[in-house]
Amino acid sequence: MPRVPLMAAALALAALSPLVTACGSSADLTIYSGRNEQLVGELITQLEERIGGTVEVRYGSSAELAAQLLEEGDATEADVFFSQDAGALGALGGAGRLDPLPATVLDAVPAEYRAEDGGWVATSARSRVLFYDPRQVPEAELPTGLDALADPAWRGRLGYAPTNASWQAFVTGLRVLRGEDGARAWLEAFAANEPVRFENNIQILDAVNAGQIAVGLSNHYYWYERVAEVGEANVPARVHYVPGGDPLGLVNVAGAGVIAGSPDAEKARQAVEFLVSDTAQQYFADVTAEYPVRSGVSSTVHDLPPLSDLQPPDIDLSDLESLQQTLALLQETGLA
């Protein structure tokens, strides 16, 4: 498994945005969360009831929080890291900053959704997809894979969100799967097609709905959330899951781990155990439209294709940690 100089990576990540300001905590448990409050705030309230204590959450991007945890070292007040993606968890695990979780927690999910060393466990999954405008792109003409997007026929018709963590994780996956030269070649071809830049995936969905672009690279759940809000008949865009193990079909995970040296490691383990419980998994399935990673749980709100039916590329999610190299490559190719 490739490793990066972690402190160098931490400093690079810290330069991306101001670190969350550390301050004294009187709570029973402190969580550094790369998941935003809008998505998981209600779940944290349920967590407090489960552990019978107060929880302080410091929100930020997963990258900046991982960097902060690496810099704080043993002096951190964090007990749990709740990450938006597997890469940040892999970085902390590789630096020895996560304690192994008990088998009762790890065994709640399939082996591909937990760290080999037991340092973290997935709490939900999401798939990279293509949003497309069926008024411009008939289903039979949808891109069959990554390389199809390099066709000049797509020039000016594609959308992406260059600063979004999910785009960066996707490119990291591309580097892992095809190597630096292979990833660079695809990025250069993608850039030659003059893709339209957006600030986030919601804007991409809006642009496809409005017919401004034909295809947008995003995560699946934005479409399902919009459909739940306004009804499918009012959402012109459609979702294309790319099959065949193509890098465009990457399935990434959010996940959690207990910080090494946590003063209340038992309560921290209880918190992670809660995040993979049936209760929390149902929350992710119904509220955030993500895939639960625990078997036997499915959404009562969203009509998602089963996670087991998706055909993502074969990749160790812990290998998505090398964000520093990804950012350098995106700068080099003009896609940052």
Image: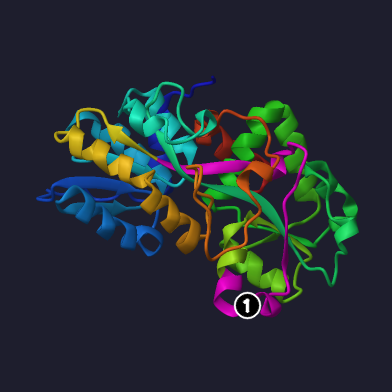
Span of residues in magenta: 226-255
Q: Nearer the viewer, residue 63 or 118?
A: 118
- Residue 121 visible (yes or no): yes
**Rendering coords of residue 15 (x, y %):** 40, 44
- State which quadrant residue 207 falls in: bottom right
Q: Nearer the viewer, residue 107 or 261?
A: 107
**Rendering coords of residue 258 (x, y %):** 29, 34
Q: Is residue 48 left or right of residue 119?
A: left
- Figure colour scheme: rainbow
- Residue 15 visible (yes or no): no
Q: Amino acid at mark 1?
A: Gly
Q: Nearer the viewer, residue 97 or 64?
A: 97
Q: Nearer the viewer, residue 109 or 320?
A: 109
Does the segment drawn in magenta span residue 290?
A: no
Measuring 56% from the left and 72% from the top, which residue is drawn there?
A: 228
Q: Is residue 102 left or right of residue 168?
A: left
Measuring 85% from the left and 69% from the top, which residue is drawn there?
A: 136
Q: Which residue is mark 1?
A: 231
Q: Quadrant of the N terminus?
A: top right
Measuring 72% from the left and 51% from the top, which residue is drawn there?
A: 241
User: Secondary structure beneath disc 1?
Assistant: loop
Q: Is residue 168 left or right of residue 239?
A: left
**Rendering coords of residue 39 (x, y %):** 41, 61
Q: Is residue 45 left or right of residue 53?
A: right
User: Hey, which residue is sitting farthest left in the picture?
Assistant: 26
